[in-house]
Amino acid sequence: MNAHLQPTGSAYFISPETAAAESHTLSVLVDNEPGVLARVIGLFSGRGYNIESLTVSETEHQAHLSRITIVTRGTPHVLEQIKAQLERIVPVHRVVDLTVRARELGQERPIEREVALVKVVGTGETRAETLRLADAFHAKVVDATVDHFILEITGKSSKIDQFVSIMKPLGLIEVCRTGIAAMNRGQQGM
């Protein structure tokens, strides 16, 4: 038997998990009250889970409910643990793994969009190239002076990543991203 596969004698020896980690989008419906977001985030940080994207907003004003959209990465076992632990937090009404739901509906992923504001400084030829590329990516100019633009772009995270990397050599100086908003296709709600 290989030495690196044998237990070390530690009570904490864990065999390597064979399932690959994958990115999942979770939607969490919670009471819109102080401290709820901190409890949800505390669950992730306290257990060493990473959050790749986080958005939160009140979605049902009359019922005082907010929707938290979290993109995280883990094995199927870890993702089930995260979901079960989220469901135990008192003001959480519902937790849906939108990635799993999409697959159940025969789709690869849920509908995911992100908005970014991108500030680019430039004059002359770089200014013209910035506008040309912004148009190609369907980005809108939301502010402009003689020496800079602030562009708004909406789309999948990969589109925004590509746009940001193209803008870097043209004078990109600042980026602000919203994080992912997501929902599944079809007639059924969360």
Image (cartoon, helix red, strand yellow):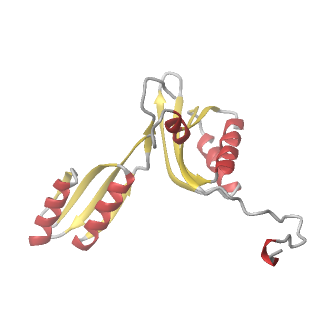
159 left or right of 94? Answer: left
Q: Is residue 165 above or below residue 94?
A: below
Which quarter of the rendered picture does the N terminus lie within?
bottom right
Horizontal and vertical percent position of residue 158: 37, 56
Using the image as rendered, state which of residue 164 and residue 119 is in the foreground: 164
User: Residue at point 33% right, 56% down?
Assistant: 160
Horizontal and vertical percent position of residue 35: 62, 42
Q: Is residue 138 above or below residue 48?
A: above
Q: Residue furthest bottom?
A: 3
Horizontal and vertical percent position of residue 62: 49, 21
Q: Residue furthest front?
A: 1
Using the image as rendered, state which of residue 52 and residue 41 is in the foreground: 52
Q: Is residue 34 visible?
A: yes
User: Residue at point 82% right, 78% down?
Assistant: 3
Using the image as rendered, state which of residue 80 and residue 67 is in the foreground: 80
User: In terms of image quadrants, where is residue 36?
Assistant: top right
58 left or right of 88? Answer: left
User: Residue at point 27% right, 62% down?
Assistant: 119
What number of labels is visible? 0
119 left or right of 123? Answer: right
User: In terms of image quadrants, where is residue 129?
Assistant: bottom left
2 left or right of 168? Answer: right
Horizontal and vertical percent position of residue 105: 49, 32
Using the image as rendered, state which of residue 72 and residue 23 is in the foreground: 23
Q: Is residue 123 visible?
A: no
